Image (cartoon, rainbow, N blue to C red):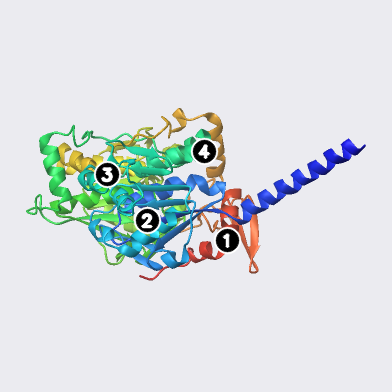
Amino acid sequence: MKYIKTIGFTLLLLALALSGYYYYQKNNPKTIAVVLFDDFTLLDVVGAYQTFSGLIFKNYQFLFVSAKPGVVQAGGGQSLIATHGFNQVKSANILYVPGSGHIGHALANDSLLAWIRSIDQTTAQTTAVGSGTLLLAKAGLLEGREAAAHFYNKVELEALGAKFVNKNYVVSGKYYTGSGTSASIDMVLQLIDDLEGEWQSKATQLFIAYDPAPPVQSGTFEEADTSVLHLAQRMAQESPVDTAREPKTIAMLLYEGFTMLDVTGPFQVFNELKPLGYEMVFVSKTGGRIMSDYLLDLSTTQSFKTLKEADILFIPGGSRTFQAMADSATMAWVTSINGGTQWTTTVCTGSLVLGQAGFLMGRQATSHWYTGSLLEKFGATYSHGRYTKDGKYITGAGVSSGIDLALMVVKELAGENYAKAIQLKLGYHPAPPHDTGSPEKTEQDIVDVLSKMYERSIPKEIPVIGKSSGVKGARVIDPVCKMDVSNGAVDSVTYKGVEYKFCSAGCKKLFESEPDMVLASMKPHVK
């Protein structure tokens, strides 16, 4: 009897310990701190951020940190909002440091280096890509360690005591460092694999539809042709390449709920067309900052009323594409602009907008793997390719395909060598840890889980322009991922007297960990 009582008491202690552990986990989410500084590379941040989203269901939360909260300018004319200042963030589980085309200013910023050094003492993993690796080295964190960085940073990195390795990414103890823009995705997938296992890493890769297929292959700096290398070096030095051409406009449409990586991949590539006279313009229905499908927003400088024509039109996908398809003003503007474009391009569900406008009838087109079959409702033939060109229309598959699609457009506009030079300058040499990223290459149970998640956000009927988007009653948006859950939410939470509904347990968990921060992200920011 005494033995039985002892076992019973032991089991009770174990149950209490486990319940305490799960309570602690729920109420103490792990933190990913992303540091922002002037002129950071936008794709470095968004590529990692979109990939890190695979951890939000594992009780991780994001903090965007800068010297002080507010707007931080990225290179190329865009910006992001820092949610916290250095003095507000004293610890993190993971630190992520992006690169910059003008890293010298950040390297001279003593307060930035001091904060990185301080936070590193608390992290389980410290990560950086591109010239961001120099910041870790300057902070004294990579002495004697192998590290990856952009090839341009080799000499300076070694002068700071690190051992430069010409690889996509390198893991040395708790330090993960990557060479270029593709490493912001590949390296984070490897980190997710190390933290949460292969299943989670593969599911994340399929979630961002990352099955890269660049239309050109520049090779590394050691392998590139002399002409390509010379051109890439001139781009890096921001030397004029050809300013004699007529000015041309690339219009990038943003609507509420667009997907960040859909936009920032092409943005980073198209930005390299400036020396050829191309100007990139972000446009929305009324202008101002536009919220993406998950916490981040971007600024638009033009509205439908002010921008009347463009040479290239780009339309991203997003969680609220169907609402955009039902909006008469959006569809009228797309129809009008398309009439004068040389190229009209889309990524992910953005191709459905073209289908709704009637431009894909009888054409080949692609889209996100889950919505591709909907193209047939518009008279298009669904192509399973990474990108598809038919006439002046170039459509890309899911999310991350925007980088490949943009290089394809550049190849058409400026030739193969110019596209290769951009690839080389950006360090876009994708090498994910797993050969997956499409349904055909992914285990069926992973495909089934994601399909079930997507099913809740897709209306049963294609929306009619000027009418409801197919969702009955008032539209209900998950405050975390901005997904439309009007057709059915998994769970709900009442906070400060208001009920919020969620597409998944992961989104609910993230909301419960930082409700005020999530709700603040739903309000429009003023620049």
Q: Is residue 502 above or below residue 521?
A: above
Question: Disc 1 versus disc 2: distance between alpha carbons?
Answer: 22 Å
Question: In front: mark 1 or mark 2?
Answer: 1
Q: Is residue 284 above or below residue 187?
A: below
Q: Name the quadrant of the C terminus.
A: bottom left
Q: Residue at x 31, y 63 (%)?
A: 110
Which of the pair 102/367 is nearer the observer? 102
Q: Position of residue 394 (x, y in %)?
A: 29, 41
Mark found first going from the N terminus, 3 or 4: 4
Q: Name the quadrant of the N terminus.
A: top right
The residue labelled by disc 4 is 200
The residue labelled by disc 1 is 474
Which of the pair 472/521 is nearer the observer? 521
Question: Which numbered dot is residue 331?
Answer: 2
The residue labelled by disc 3 is 406
Question: In front: mark 4 or mark 1?
Answer: 4
